[in-house]
Amino acid sequence: MNNLTTPTIRYPAPSLESLPDDIKARILEVQEKAGFIPNVFLGFARRPAEWRAFFAYHDALMLHEGGNLTKGEREMIVTTTSAANHCLYCVVAHGAILRIYEKKPLVADQVAVNYRKADITPRQSAMLDFAMKVCQHSDAINDADFAALHAHGFDDEDAWDIAAITAFFGLSNRMASFSGMQPNPEFYLMGRLPRTNSKP
């Protein structure tokens, strides 16, 4: 007997037209760039003040310049720790972005299932070791964990970035999962096949 049920969206997203102008403008900008509106943008917009705080912190962590983490590595942290938190939305959505940034069609699936066997560098593996410890046992972080990062060229500010990304998306994972947020279908195929330049 099939016990699978259709996922429930507990909090229907508001209409784009009903949103404050600043939020609507940001969402339209994302739609223009991506070709669709990721469900998280509308799903969280039901509470505008929280939406603004959420995306301000998101942008501070994921879009800022400087530090030793690439954009792909930031997405690698999100995908790996979101998998540990069993967040379907974040694994699928950020896994898609990871594939695009790293130009590796297989990497998101690999790190989501078992990053220790993924096609990543020893540096990235050390980064994910730290992220996973923050994700699952942050109370046990000690000097040895920092030393392991330092051995691969990360400094204490990079450790802060890794921990902050992990912690922030721990919140995002839980909000997406409890509310029944589903990944947009577009995310599943993004970055899986190399782009071909067709010539007339």
Image (cartoon, rainbow, N blue to C red):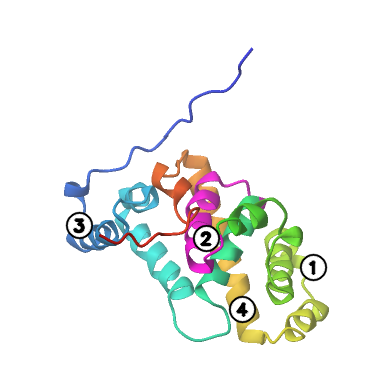
Q: Earlier in the sequence, mark 4 or mark 3?
A: 3
Q: Nearer the viewer, residue 74 or 145?
A: 74
Distance between the alpha carbons at the discs numbered 2 and 4: 24 Å
> Which residue in the protein does label 4 denote?
160
Question: Which of pointers 1 and 3 lies earlier in the amino acid sequence?
Answer: 3
Residue plotted at (69% across, 63% down): 119
Picture coordinates of residue 159, whole percent (x, y)? 65, 79
- For numbered disc 3, what is the local secondary structure? loop
Disc on res. 99 = 2
> Within the magenta stretch, is there residue 106?
no
Q: Is residue 89 magenta?
A: yes
State whether the magenta stretch is mostly helix, strand or loop.
Answer: helix
Reading the image, the residue beneath label 1 is 140
Please determine whether, in this image, residue 88 is positioned above or below residue 172. above
Residue type beneath disc 1: Ala
State the SS at label 2. Answer: helix
Give the spatial CA distance, label 1 vs label 3.
43 Å
Marks 4 and 1, the one that precedes in the sequence: 1
Picture disc at residue 20: 3
Q: Secondary structure at mark 4?
A: helix
Is residue 66 rendered to the left or right of residue 162?
Answer: left
Alpha carbon separation for disc pair 4 and 1: 15 Å
Q: Is residue 155 left or right of residue 140?
A: left
Position of residue 127 relative to residue 13, above or below, is below
Tell me where residue 109 appears, x and y as whole percent: 62, 52
Badge number at residue 4: none
